Image: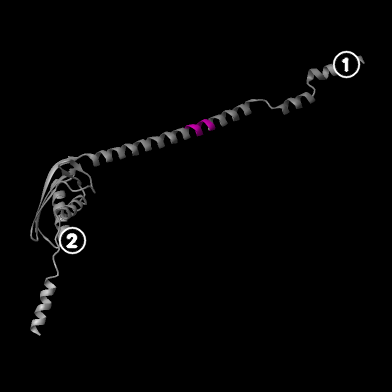
């Protein structure tokens, strides 16, 4: 029986190998690096690559189950580079080890540039908000001006109505004889 047990164990250990192409590790490194807030891109020979692009700024060295990684990045302006760099290194290490089971000896991070893209986007967003607020204020001022004009027009109309004599008092005055009219009526009745 011992011979059968040894044979079974040998079969379990001889199920084959799993190997990884450098491109697989490079892709893991690329995604893990650009997931970190403050990393704007991975840099390569062909220039800067945005998030989700093919990893060209990554070099992977594998020695059996040990991996060393070099990655070149661009960070967002205003971000603390040391903190962002350490976060990226740790994220790369965890991602490779959890996905492949390989041991990561080191992750060298090379900061090759600073991106102002995020800052420019924030500036543009601020400008849009400012313009929007300005437009709202203008609209509000126009509405207030219109309301003030309407109120002023109503007040002027009311003043005109109060200043204009109405037809009714004139009609009453025509019905009642004045002192002169009464004297004239008397003269005309005497002459008749």
Picture disc at residue 180: none
107 over 77 or under it: above or below: below
Front-most of residues 120 and 70: 70
Front-most of residues 82 and 58: 58
Q: Is residue 55 visible?
A: yes
- Residue 170: x and y in percent read 73, 25
Q: Residue at x 63, y 28 (%)?
A: 161
Indicate the quadrant containing the C terminus: top left, top right, bottom left or bottom right.
Answer: top right
Residue 18 falls in image quadrant: bottom left
Q: Residues within 10 Å of mark 1 (few under 14, many from 20)?
A: few
**Secondary structure found at label 1:** helix
Picture disc at residue 99: 2
Dot placed on the residue nearer the N-terminal end, 2 or 1: 2
150 over 2 or under it: above or below: above
Main secondary structure of the magenta stretch: helix
Which color scheme does this rendered protein use? one colour
- Residue 80: x and y in percent read 16, 46
Of the two numbered discs 2 and 1 in the rendering, the one whose residue sits closer to the viewer: 2
34 over 179 or under it: above or below: below
Which residue ends up furthest to the right in the rendered image?
192
33 over 176 or under it: above or below: below
Q: Residue at x 79, y 19 (%)?
A: 179
Q: Residue at x 54, y 32 (%)?
A: 150
98 part of magenta stretch: no
Alpha-carbon span between mark 2 and mark 1: 127 Å
Magenta-drawn segment: 145-150
Indicate the quadrant containing the N terminus: top left, top right, bottom left or bottom right.
Answer: bottom left
Which residue is disc 1 drawn over?
Answer: 188
């Amino acid at each position: 029986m011992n011979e059968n047990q040894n044979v079974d164990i040998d079969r379990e250990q001889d199920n084959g190998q799993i190997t990884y192409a450098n491109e697989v590790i490079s892709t893991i490194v690329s995604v893990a690096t650009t997931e970190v807030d403050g990393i704007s891109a991975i840099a390569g020979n062909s220039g800067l690559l945005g998030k989700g692009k093919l990893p060209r700024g990554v070099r992977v060295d594998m020695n059996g189950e040990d991996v060393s990684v070099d990655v070149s990045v661009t960070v967002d302006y205003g971000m603390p580079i040391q903190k962002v760099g350490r976060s990226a290194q740790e994220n790369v290490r965890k991602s490779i080890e959890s996905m492949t089971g390989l041991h990561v000896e080191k992750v060298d991070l090379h900061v090759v540039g600073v991106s102002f893209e995020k800052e420019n986007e924030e500036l543009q967003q601020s400008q849009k908000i400012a313009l929007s607020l300005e437009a709202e204020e203008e609209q509000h001022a126009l509405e207030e001006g219109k309301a003030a004009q309407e109120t002023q027009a109503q007040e002027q109309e009311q003043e005109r109505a109060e200043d204009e004599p109405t037809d009714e008092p004139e009609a009453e005055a025509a019905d009642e004889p004045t002192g002169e009219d009464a004297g004239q009526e008397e003269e005309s009745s005497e002459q008749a």
